[in-house]
Amino acid sequence: MTKVIPFFEAHPLLSSKGLEFTIFASIVKAMNQKEHLSKAGFDGLVEQALHMNGDGRYRRTDWTTRILRGHTPNTDQDP
């Protein structure tokens, strides 16, 4: 938030990675605003991330159950 994103916003990438950075920066900024703590916000950020790097042509489809288990808030229960 304080080093990488401002640097690349001031010095945009001229390659095809420019769009990837734009998506990455929007995800990081949303997480900084704690949007990822709600189920809807988290799902939206995952959807954005899935469109990075060629829409994930080589991405595994089962990664969320392996990586995120135990590391995300439980949004299925009432507070």
Image (cartoon, helix red, strand yellow):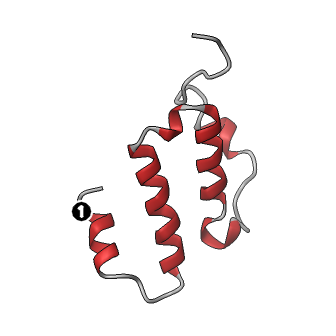
Residue wearing tag 1: 3
Question: Element under label 1?
Answer: loop
| Quadrant housing residue 10 | bottom left
Up/down of 42 relative to 48, above or below: above
Residue 60 relative to residue 30: left or right: right
Residue at position x 68%, y 36% from top? 65
| Quadrant housing residue 49 | bottom right
Residue at position x 24%, y 62% from top? 3
Q: How many labels does the image show?
A: 1
Up/down of 25 relative to 76, above or below: below
> Measured from the top left, where is residue 46 in percent x and y?
62, 49
Residue 43 relative to residue 14: left or right: right
Up/down of 2 relative to 32, above or below: below
Residue at position x 52%, y 39% from top? 36
**On-image quarter of the C terminus:** top right
**On-image quarter of the N terminus:** bottom left
> Measured from the top left, where is residue 32 in percent x and y?
38, 45
Residue 6 relative to residue 52: left or right: left
Q: Please tell me how crowded label 1 is: few (under 14), some (14-19), or many (20+) other residues with Cα within 10 Å.
A: few
> Measured from the top left, where is residue 40 in percent x and y?
65, 37
